[in-house]
Image (tube, rainbow, N blue to C red):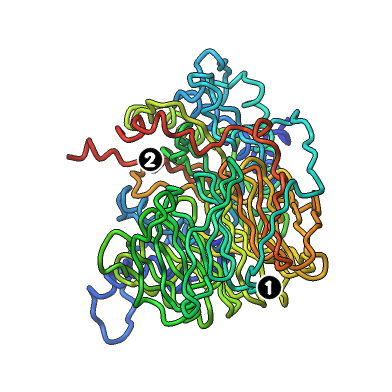
Amino acid sequence: MDAGSVNSSSSSSYLNAQSRWPLRDQFHQKKSSKENLDRFIPNRSAIDFDYAHYMLMEGRKGKENPPASSPSREAYRKHLAETFNMNRSRILAFKNKPPAPVELFPPHFFSSQQQDKPTKPKRSIPQTSERTLDAPDLVDDYYLNLLDWGSCNVLAIALGNTVYLWDASNGSTSELVTVDEENGPITSVSWAPDGQHIAIGLNNSEVQLWDSTSNKQLRTLKGGHRLRVGSLAWNNHILTTGGMDSLIINNDVRVRSHIVETYRGHEQEVCGLKWSPSGQQLASGGNDNLLFIWDRSTASSNSPTQWAHRLEDHTSAVKALAWCPFQSNLLASGGGGGDRCIKFWNTHTGACLNSVDTGSQVCSLLWNKNERELLSSHGFTQNQLTLWKYPSMVKMAELTGHTSRVLFMAQSPDGCTVASAAADETLKFWNVFGAPQAAKPAPKANPEPFSHVNRIR
Amino acid sequence: MASRTVTKDIITLRGSAAIVSEFFGYAANSILYNRGLYPEESFVKVKKYGLPMLLTQDESVKSFIANVTAQLSEWLEAGKLQRIVLVIMSKVTNEVLERWNFSIETDSEVVEKGVSREKSDKEIMREIQAIMRQIASSITYLPCLDEACVFDVLAYTDKDVAVPFTWIESDPKLIANPQMVKLHSFDTKIHKVDTLVSYKNDEWDEQ
C-alpha cells in the first residue's frame, strides 16, 4: 500500500514528506514558484504552518487531503489512485454469491454465476468418446487451427487442401472447398459468429471468406500477410488474422480496403488468437513463447501497435487460449512441449493468477460454459484430454483414446459436446461437459428479452 | 472504576479490526436497504451507532455478509486489506451501476510492533454515525435503480495474500466515466476508512 513507502515514524520531516508524494508535486511547485528565491532563507511569515502541521500529522499516514482541494478533485484523485493501484493489489470476491432478490423475473433470467446449487447431483463423465470419425490427411502441425464448430451446429475441419463440413444435427458431411495444390494446404478455419460464413486461412498467405449455405466464395483477403495464416478470430465484422510473418491484422470484412489495424509485437509465427467474449480484448500467442493482450479500444485510437500486456511467462509456444465465460478478464493459456503449463491471467492487470504443470504439451483449451471447469488437450505421452475443476485445478477426468497428440478441440454451440481432432487422423466426440438437459440454461440468451430495458438508461 | 474508563480509550489492532468489519456489515445492510435491493419487509430495525439501523433477516444475505465480514476482519488484523467495495449490478445485464468504495489505511506500526492507540469509542461512533447518515441520505442524489439489481463485495488485499479457498480473484467491476461523491471518513487511529460512492453517469440529465 501507499502508506508502506512512507516513513511512518513521527520524526519524518516536512521535506521528507514533500519529496515522497508524486501525486502532489504539482501542488507544491505552484506554491514554491511564487517565491522565486535563489537560496533558501527561512521566512516564518511565508511558511504555512497549518499545512506543514497537516503534512506531519496526517499526511504521513498516506492520506492526501490538501486543504485547497475540492471534493470533486479529491474524488478524481481517488479514481486515479485506484487506476494506478490496480497492479499492486489483489481483488477478491467471495465465491458464493449473495442471493438475488425476489423473483420479479422468471428464474432462468438468473445469470449462471449467481447460482451455485450445492445440491447438484454428481455428473458422471463418460470415459470414452461418443463417436469417432475419420480425418484423413489432417495436417500434423501444432501451429495451425483446423477445427471449428459454428453457432449453426456445423463442424468445419480442414483436411489437407479441403474444408469439410459436418452437420452435427443430422450427421451429414459435405465438402465446402478444395483449394489448388499451390495455394494449400489450408492452415486455419473459423466460423463467423452467425454460423453461416466461414473464414479459411491458406498457406499462400491469403484468407478466403465463404458462405456455407450457398457454398459460394464471397471474397479473398490478400495483401495483409506475407506468409501462411495459421490463426483466425472473429469479433463481429472484424476478422483478425495471425500469420507466420508474426503480424496480427484486423480486417473489416465489409469494406474494400479491409485492413483496419495491424498489431506488431510478436517475433515469430502467431498460432493462438482469441477475442474475449465482450470483444474488448484480444489474446494472441506465438511461437516466440509470448502472450499478448491487445485492447480494442486503445488500438483503434492513436497507438495501433501498443499492447495492453506482454506476458513472457511461458517457456514454449503459446497456442492454446481460452477466455473464461463466467469471469470477465480471466484468460487461460497453455504452453507447448517445453513449457507444459496452463496459466491463468487477469487480463485487466496482467497478473498471472495460477500456473499448473500438466506434464505434457498443451494443444488446446476449452472452458465448460455450464460449470466452472476447463478442458485441456495434450500430446506425448498420453495424448489425453484432461478435465480440470476451476479454480482448484483438481483433475476431474482424463480421457484417453487418441493415439497421437490432440491438436484441436471445438465445442458444440450448446456447450455440452467437445470435438477433438488428433494427429492420429481421427475426430472424436466427447460428452464431457454434461448432457444438454442437465445443464443450466445458457446465460447468453438471458439478456435478450430485457436488453431494451437496459438501453433506455 | 477509574481503570475501566482508561481501558475503554485504548484501542488494539484486534478491536479496530472488529470495529471496521462491523461497520462494513452495517453499512452494507444500510446500502442494501436504502438502495432497495431487497424488499423492505426483509429488514428489521435495531439501534446502533446511536441511530436506527436496518438489518436484513434474509438468511442467505445474512450469512453472505457474515462470511465476508469474518474474512475481512482477519485481513484487517493482518493489515492486508486495502479496500472493500460493494458493487451493485443490474441483475439482467450484470452492468455495474454503483460502487461503494471503502478505502482502508492501516497504521503499519501497530501491525508490525503490536502497539495500541488511544481513541474513545464515543468519538469513533460519532464518526461512523456521520457516514451512516450520509449513506441513508444518498438516495436523494443517486440515480434510481429502476431494474432488479444484485450486489457483490470485492476485497482489495495486498499482493502477498493467499487466496482463501472460498474466495476467487475478480475483476474490479469498474464503472466507465463514473460520477463520484466522497462521504465522511472515520479513523480508529489504527484503521482509517474513507468512503466514496461512484455511480453510472446519467447522460440524460447532463444535457
B54 vs B60, left or right, is left
Q: Which amino acid type corresponds to the residue marked 1 in the rendered image? A: Gly
Residue at which label 1 appears: A336
Q: Nearer the viewer, residue A54 or B187?
A: B187
The answer to whether residue A7 of the structure is visible from this angle is: no
Query: Residue A332 at x, y = what percent?
Result: 62, 59
Nearer to us of marks 1 and 2 is 1
Query: Residue A209 at x, y = what percent?
Result: 39, 62
Which corner quadrant of the image does residue A307 belong to?
bottom left
A138 vs B202, left or right, is right
**Residue furthest toward the left?**
B207
Which corner quadrant of the image does residue A21 belong to?
bottom left
Query: Residue A380 at x, y = what percent?
Result: 79, 71
User: Is the residue marked by circle 1 packed among few (<14), some (14-19), or many (20+) residues within 10 Å?
Assistant: many
Q: Eyeballing the image, is A420 above or below B194?
A: below
Residue at which label 2 appears: B199
**Residue furthest toward the bottom?**
A38
Q: Nearer the viewer, residue B16 or B139?
A: B139
